[in-house]
Each structure stands twice: as structure tokens, then as C-alpha cells.
Amino acid sequence: MALAVGEKLEQDGFPVIYTRTTDVYQRPIEKARIANDSGGDYFVSFHRNSSPNPNTYSGVQTLVYNDSGVPASMARNVNEELVKVGFNDLGVPVRPDLVVLRRTKMPAILIEAGFINTEADNQLFDSNFNEMADAIAAGIEKTVGTGSSTKTFGVQVGLFRRYENAQYLLNELLNQGYNAQIREWNQYYAVIVGQEESLEDARALERQLQNQGYDTLIVNI
């Protein structure tokens, strides 16, 4: 599923890096290290859920370190798209104990793509595999915008539920001389710096903001 989603994202213009492409075991901390060393903007982990008793639970969950910002938004978008395939939405649990969520430096989510010991979920997984891959890719793309063929890039430094919080950060950035703006998206308010015509310029701006202590994310605008 990870390879299928990655292929879809690559077709849509996103560069994709995998922690592994073959069936080999990796410790969670190794996955986090590979992700951090890659310089990636997002981390997506793929799993199947399970329960003590078969056929007890059914549906998808997407786990996050905390219920805020880009990860929470991406998690809900992925769930929303998977519901269209036929899964129940079991929500966005907060799991700060998971290494791949706690130790990754970029926004991270962990997708539980149905219960592996529930017949209904396995049937959906097997018969709608391609639709699931498209749905997960769509949820990710809904969060971050279109692929890298888009000509204008910005650096997102905050995503808020409350407009007042976004405005506070915007004023802070404007006072430092940055070209910044607030964009409303899917009931959230994103604070975005810059309007760069190349990904290289956006990355340079991102490094500058990171050096000042901001959490950053390159987005298409």
C-alpha cells in the first residue's frame, strides 16, 4: 500500500522517499532516523489494525502525536477519503508514545488501514486496493496542495483552529520583515511565508525560518 500511494503521489508531482521497499524489518527508531536524514516534509506510516477478538472492530484510524496542526488535518483528510471507499471512520487517536510520531522532525501520521482480523475490512482492502491507494494520496494532497509542478511555493509556519492565534504569528513575522499571509483552509488558518517561484528558493527560506526556531513546511500556494 505504501508503494502504491507513493507511486500515485509521484505521478502527481511529489518526490517520495521510502524507509524501505522490500519486506525487511526496521526498528521504529530506524524509520524515524531515515525520515529525518532524508529532509522530507512529511512522514506517513502504513499499518493494519488488530484487536484481541476477530471481527470485533471495523474501520480506519489515523494516529497523530497531538491533535493539532498539519498532522491532525492530514489525518482527518485521509480518514475522510477512506470513508468514501467504504470504511468506518474511527477517528484520530493521539499517540505520543509511538516512536515514529514522537521522534520524526516533520509532520507525521500513522495510518491504520482497517483491521487485519476483521473479515469486512479485509474484503474492502483486497477488493478496493487501488481505490484505497488513491484515497490516501488524495487525503495527503488535500492537506498539502498540488504537486511540485506548481510554480509558486511558500513556507507554512503555523496551522491554527483559531484565527486570533494565526494573526498573532502573522504579526510577529511581519514585524521581522517577512512577506507573510494567512490562508483559510478546511476550517484551519495557515500562516505562510513567502511566494517563491522555485523549490530551491523555498527551501532556502525554510532553512532561514528553521534557524529562527519555526516549525516549517513547504507548501504550494
Image: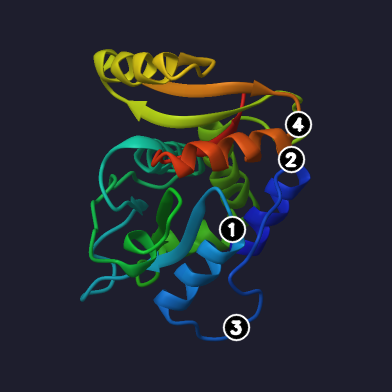
Q: Which of marks 1 and 3 is in front?
A: 3
Left or right: residue 199 versus residue 106 is right
Q: In which quarter of the image is the C terminus?
A: top right
Which residue is labeled 1 in the image?
A: 127
State the image coordinates of residue 148 (x, y, percent, origin top left). 73, 36
Give me the residue at 26% from left, 60% from top.
57
Left or right: residue 57 versus residue 133 is left
- For this rendering, which residue is in front, 91 or 218? 218
Residue type pointed to by label 2? Asp
Q: Residues within 10 Å of mark 3 (few under 14, many from 20)?
A: few
Which residue is labeled 3 in the image?
A: 23
- Name the element at disc 1: helix
Q: Do the residues labelled 1 and 4 touch (CB within 8 Å)?
A: no
Q: How crowded is mark 2: few (under 14 residues within 10 Å), some or many (20 or more)?
A: some
Left or right: residue 131 versus residue 47 is right
**In this rendering, is residue 27 above or below 67?**
below
- Name the element at disc 2: loop
Say the numbered circle drawn on residue 198.
4
Is residue 187 visible in the rendered image? The answer is: no
Q: Residue furthest bottom?
A: 24
Q: Are marks 3 and 4 in contact (CB under 8 Å)?
A: no
Residue type pointed to by label 1? Ser
Residue type pointed to by label 3? Asp
